[in-house]
Image (cartoon, rainbow, N blue to C red):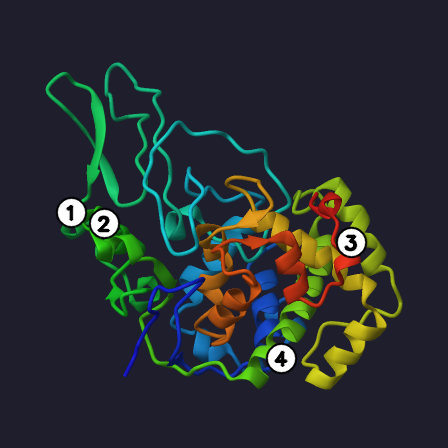
Amino acid sequence: MQTGGDGRGLGDGGGKSHVHTGTSHWKCLLSKLVSQLDLPGAPHTADFSPHCPCSAKLKSLKMRVWIVFLLCLAGHAIAAPTEEEPLVEELVTEEAVVEEPEVGANPVQVEVGEFDEAIEVDDVAAENPCLNYHCKKGKVCEVDESNTPLCVCQDPSTCPPAEGEFEHVCGTDNKTYDSSCHFFATKCTLEGTKKGHKLHLDYIGPCKYIEPCLDTELNEFPLRMRDWLKNVLVTLYERDEDNNLLTEKQKLRVKKIYENEKRLQAGDHSLDLLARDFKKNYNMFIFPVHWQFGQLDQHPVDGYLTHSELAPLRAPLIPMEHCTTRFFETCDADGDKYIALEEWASCFGIKEQDVDKDLII
């Protein structure tokens, strides 16, 4: 029985653990996200979903996933690998850190420490060469004979012990690691090998069996995700105030959606209703789809999504939405291991004439 991903393409591969994929899961994600914000006037989870059916399934993940989401909503763009990489290959080149300007927080992005590999900087403190010398995940700083700092693979046994199952992560080698620290340290020790080249962090939580995504289920996936992205933006707009969750340009776009009386309110809707809403209020979904692409396309900002750039969105979703991996694989229509904006928009049903790079703001 397969218990995790196979490391192919954009995700975890075929057969994995089946989890209910109803619209309530997306609503639950949104409600739990907002409940963790602790913003003035922010509703509790119950305000969105009195009987959130995904709570039990998320129990083992809730501490890590929602803490990470909270960090993202503070408005910090994630740091990602320094080199653009194919969706199935991670390059390990290290270079100086380039500070990125803050952008509208992406509620489905997660802390860099969980999925991406931070970058080394050359700012070395004289009294302690390693003080301001940062290594990517899986490596630690040491000094050589000339007192020059360098990064070496961390011994997995030196990682802090996991406080609970919620810290576990699943790799594409179908193995459960005690924490992301243990995973990246292990990956580092495999550098230069075929196994290490293909090893990626697959999803949050221990590895488990996930059923294959059926064609009918794959067709339903974008219906829920489109609606969820729209509701996330509306919620951020409602709760933004002085928290800078959205940029001013983003607020202007979302305001039009928020004030539209035809907007379908957040709720546990049937797939038929979601399909009718998309057809009737198509224009409301154009910006949310572009916005999510812009939140992921950060390192580098080049109009393409790599495996690592997708990780912040994939990892929290896979345990709850078993079609996540297949969906992203399908988005790569030309099979070049990169998802272009046009491919991304097409995956969500956005018409070619409505794809506009100027909406990435």
User: Which part of the image, by quadrant, shows the N terminus?
Assistant: bottom left
Q: Which mark is residue 185?
A: 2
Separation of residues labelled 1 and 3 (CA atoms): 47 Å
Mark sitting earlier along the chain (2/3): 2
Residue at which label 1 appears: 155
Please name the amino acid that badge 3 sits on.
Answer: Val
Q: Is residue 156 above or below residue 60?
A: above
Mark sitting earlier along the chain (1/2): 1
Q: Residue furthest left?
A: 145
Residue at which label 3 appears: 254
Q: Position of residue 185 (x, y in %)?
A: 23, 49
Mark sitting earlier along the chain (4/3): 4
Q: Position of residue 220 (x, y in %)?
A: 62, 79
Q: Residue at x 79, y 75 (%)?
A: 277
| In the image: residue 56, left or right of residue 25 | left
Q: Residue furthest right?
A: 261
Asked where in the image residue 161 lies, by quadrant, the reply is: bottom left
Mark sitting earlier along the chain (1/4): 1
Mark sitting earlier along the chain (1/3): 1
Answer whether labels 1 and 2 touch (C-beta < 8 Å). yes
| In the image: residue 84, left or right of residue 220 | left
Separation of residues labelled 4 and 3 (CA atoms): 25 Å
Mark sitting earlier along the chain (4/2): 2
4 or 2: mark nearer the eye? 4
Please name the amino acid that badge 1 sits on.
Answer: Asp
Q: Is residue 240 above or below residue 301?
A: below
Q: Position of residue 296 (x, y in %)?
A: 56, 50
